[in-house]
Image (tube, rainbow, N blue to C red):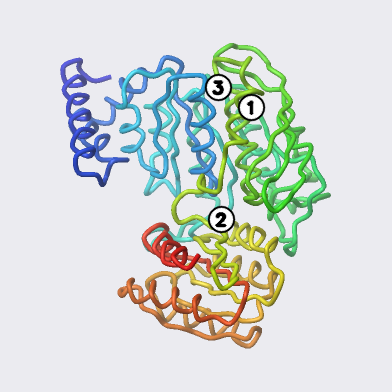
Amino acid sequence: MVGNFRYKFAKCMGKLGNFLVHLNGGMGKSFPGWLFLHVGSYEALNNLAKEPEIGSVIVTGTNGKTTTTTMLIKLLSKDAQICSNFESNTVNAIATGLLQGKSELGVFEYGIRDFEHGIPGEVQRLVDPIGVVYTTISREHTQVLGIKNPFDKYLAAKRELSLNMKRGVIVANVDDPRTVYIGKNKEKDVPVNYFGLDIDYNDIFPERDVECPVCGRKLQYSKRFLNHRGIYQCECGFKRPEPNVKITKLQTSPSRWFITIEGNVYNYPNDTNVSFKIDTDVPPFGIHNIYNTLCSTTAYASFTPKIENIEKTACEVFEGLTMAILPPGRFEVVKLNDGKMVGLGQGDNGDALKVNVLFMNQYIDNKLEFIYTTPDVGEEEVFEDHLEAIRAINPDHLIVIPGRESVEIAREYYNQIKDEFNADFYPYPYSEMEKRIKGIVKLILNSGYKNIIVSGCGEEQAMWERIKQEIKKER
């Protein structure tokens, strides 16, 4: 706790920061919170976090954080006054959201890569969330700011965000053994609401060994849904639990996907269990976003104060969704005037590129060109994951472009795969981002292929969103 005067002064400065960013834009997701914490110290966040009447929910994971948080905000805001922040992964951004004013619930996205560049334990202690939501956990950047980032430390940092929770609910992906591992270790302290698929769906990618998070042995899968997600068990007794919330029906069409969600969860504000069945439709935005829909539904049912609204509100929100819900820079498919179908957006880790490939695969009706932007030095494991995705979709033509700083490592990656594919290398330098963007746009517009996928590593919004906007001019 900090002194009352210092806290009030810090809060005034934070609100001044809010006023300033509304005047000038920029840094709006983090600057007011940074100013508040700079004046009041991290301990002041503990005071601020007590202001939402019910408490705060934090969404984390490797993929799907922003989309899940966006959906959860849409759902909960129908039932409660909320404060929120997303598309930013810092404690400053959480503080900025809490500064928005009187609220019943806080909803925040928080990304964690390692202990050196994140403070998950401190965030948990200071915010004292009533909920931590885990979307999925897979290998992301294998190095952060030039430092090797082993996966076991990455998983431990994710786990730290809920490790000391003594109240509230954890929401975890039952199809992901890593989030189940976190959930199982917390069931003695707090309720855990698991979500997963209960449909006939099979992964198109080659099976890769997945270690049991308990004993390290190879997990045995009876079904694979998406990469390491599926139905699994281990000789040590660790296995996939039954989901509390599940997709029991998925019917796809070019315009909308129709889903049925059934669930029975513990609801924190009402201290009771609640059952529901939701028949609704969503945009045709891929199986990964079906997971995000399911995750946000589970979190909504866990934390809404108005449990009688769950089915009605979920239908209203999901049926109103369009592809515009995808965050800036994320993968989407654009049809150009000349008939080209272009799927483009970031795919920084292997899991992300694979879901992009799955998403694009439903539109391919002819030969395919893949414009692939590579990882950097020290990210060979990401490249190996990317290569699995490229092989799965088997493009007729592959173009390799540096996605990060090193042109030389991009050339090495190209040399490893050039004999396997009909491939070309374009060494656009990272230091000349404008040249890279214009070069990629030119390659798309001049391509002789009707189906093109553009994905891989790169600046999440600065590069991908610019390319999208240039391409959309040709619609």
- The amino acid beneath tag 2 is Arg
Residue 392, numbered circle: none
- Name the N-terminal-most of marks 1 and 3: 1
Seen at 22% across and 30% down, the residue is 14
- The amino acid beneath tag 1 is Val
Q: Position of residue 145 (x, y in %)?
A: 36, 60
Tally of numbered discs: 3
Q: Which residue is mark 1?
A: 192
- Name the N-terminal-most of marks 2 and 3: 2
Is label 1 or label 3 in front?
3
- Label 1 element class: strand
Seen at 65% across and 51% down, the residue is 286
With 379 as the anchor, is 41 left or right in this view? Answer: left
Mark 1 and 3 residues: CB-CB less than 8 Å, in contact?
Answer: no
Say which of 36 and 82 sits in front.
82
Disc 3 crowd rating (10 Å Cα; few below 14, some 14-19, many 20+) is: many
With 94 as the anchor, is 112 left or right in this view? Answer: right
Is residue 257 depicted above or below 183 in this figure?
Answer: below
Seen at 53% across and 61% down, the residue is 347
Say which of 184 and 243 sits in front.
243
Q: Which residue is mark 2?
A: 139
Residue 11 sits in quarter: top left
Give the position of the N terminus as an image quadrant: top left
- Label 2 element class: loop
Instruction: Report, in whole angstroms, how far the alpha carbon at label 1 lies from the one at label 3.
Output: 12 Å
Is residue 436 depicted above or below 34 in this figure?
Answer: below
Q: Position of residue 310 (x, y in %)?
A: 63, 22
Q: Which residue is mark 3?
A: 303
